[in-house]
Amino acid sequence: MATKKRVVVIGGGAGGALLANNLPLEEFDVTVIDRSPYHYYWPWLLYVAFKGSKRPMKKEIRELLKPGVSFIQAGAQSVDLNNRKVVLENGKTLEYDYLVIATGSRPTYSQIGGHKKVVERYGDYHSSEENARRVWNAINSLKQGTFAVIVGGDPYRCPPSPLEGVFLAEEFFRARGLRDKVKIVFAVPYPRPYPAEPMNEVVEPILRERGIEYITFFTLDRIDEEKKVAVSMEGEELKYDVLVVIPPHVGTDMKIAPEDVLTQDRFIQADKYTNNIKGFDDAFVIGDASAVPVAKTGVTAHLQAGVVARRLQGEDARNSGRTNCPFDLGYGLGTFVISDYNNPVVKLPPSRFSHLAKIAFAASYWDMIRYPELWNPIFEAYFEATEPAKLGRIYV
Amino acid sequence: MAENRIRVDARGIACPGPITELVKAYRNAKNGDIIEVLATDPGFKPDVEAWIKRTGNQLLELKEEGGIYIAVIKVTAKK
Ligand SMILES: Cc1cc2nc3c(=O)[nH]c(=O)nc-3n(C[C@H](O)[C@H](O)[C@H](O)COP(=O)(O)OP(=O)(O)OC[C@H]3O[C@@H](n4cnc5c(N)ncnc54)[C@H](O)[C@@H]3O)c2cc1C
């Protein structure tokens, strides 16, 4: 029998775990490395922050991986792509035939003056359960004044998430009977509330209808928590009582040789169709860690994991650049941001169905990671039925 | 002060859109820096024009070549 090919996967999140579970173990010897013992379902931070959800949002990576896939709980410190080596923080070295980097992205608090203080005070919903809980406490203690959400910089996970927070906050204050006492302000550095125009045509009227104020072209520079004012790079000021900033994210904390595969903000450059790391046919990067022109969402990580799993088995699978970000609009309504490399974002009208689809997805999430062989055909059918080229003709 | 040229490749980005890449480069730039953005999304042209008008930075060049938009911007408006 031929020896099995050694696949090392760094990161056991949405992309990494799914990739590992998609590989046939007769052919591959698969090892997943993660610094954390847990896999987090990050989208749930939204419901911790704005609904006070106490539902568990993490599971042990070891339990999510198929029997036969090895798991090493350790941080990866450096990757040497030329010599096919990964050095762990515990000093061990792993060699591979194929490498898949799936280390995600992480918020940074060093780009905006005063950002750290604001997070310590009011939390955010892009970093940890603890910070999301702080948001919940902050909105519960606000009885009057201004609640502000500011997009602090790009990129961040899940493009709809800033507005989802705003919509859920509005619903929260209305339900508490405080809507006439609490002003809600949303500020973005873009020309419109949602950066892609067709989706903006869906959400901007909803903002107006619900009396949510918004400020465009606001590039956040610094925050003065004593004076409770956020200042833009051009000197515009926004006063607040409670402020949640969507933090800009950066890429990997690992050292990578050669260094020129990294962008300035440490995302890893790759072919947008195959996910091959620039210049390497035996190394891939999937999900949020990659610098490919597509939104940082779990759905993207999921689809890329499928493409790389098939490529490792010798198929010429390619990404279409498909996005499918669920968008919670509050009050039980939702939509999806659907596009691909060849088609702009579809203007998909709000519906209860879209919201329920998001919740159904959340409910089945762990099962989808654990049993891709059962879910792959369902996803394939869904993605085919909702191709942006088809939807674009229906919703214009 | 040496002029710093920042190149941004935003080709192919439909969601969330190429304007997000410009905004990212702007955050890290200093007054005097030049930002050059490549994009394929047709919405990029009016967005750059609106962005220049509102932020007060300087547009040195905005052209289309074979379906690719190229914007060259001088950062001047930071306080
Ligand atoms: C509020 C919010 C709402 C969202 N909503 C949606 C949604 O509705 N739909 C959707 O599709 N997506 C959504 N997302 C985005 C989604 O959560 C991410 O895009 C997805 O988790 C990316 O998967 P990933 O595998 O690339 O990274 P992650 O899931 O972040 O996994 C990365 C893993 O790598 C590990 N790691 C990192 N560095 C190292 C290292 N050096 N050594 C070892 N291990 C390391 C980490 O511990 C982590 O387990 C949302 C995100 C947020 C924050």
Image: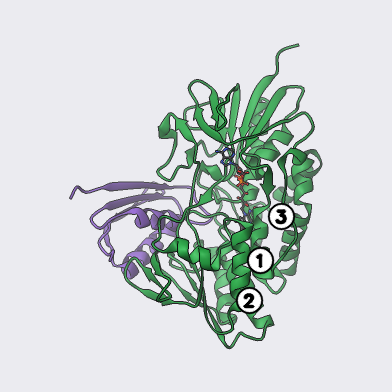
Chain colours: A green, B purple
Mark 3 secondary-structure assignment? loop
Give the amino acid at mark 1.
Answer: Asp
Mark 2 secondary-structure assignment? helix
Reading the image, the residue beneath label 3 is: A57
Chain containing mark 3: A
Sort mark 3 into few (<14), some (14-19) or many (20+) by Cα contacts within 10 Å: some
Give the amino acid at mark 2.
Answer: Asn
First in sequence: mark 2 vs mark 3:
3
Reading the image, the residue beneath label 1 is: A328
Task: From the viewer's side, name the closer residue of A18 and A73.
Answer: A73
The answer for how far apart the CA atoms under marks 2 and 3 are is: 22 Å
Sort mark 1 into few (<14), some (14-19) or many (20+) by Cα contacts within 10 Å: many
Task: From the viewer's side, name the closer residue of A254 and B29.
Answer: A254
Q: Note whether ligand 1 is within 8 Å of mark 1.
A: yes
Reading the image, the residue beneath label 2 is: A140
Q: Residue at x 57, y 41 (%)?
A: A103
State the image coordinates of residue A13 (x, y, percent, origin top left).
Answer: 65, 43
Mark 1 secondary-structure assignment? strand
Is A18 left, or right, of B71 in this rendering? right
Which residue of the protein is positioned furthest toward the left in this rendering?
Answer: B1
The answer for how far apart the CA atoms under marks 2 and 1 are is: 21 Å
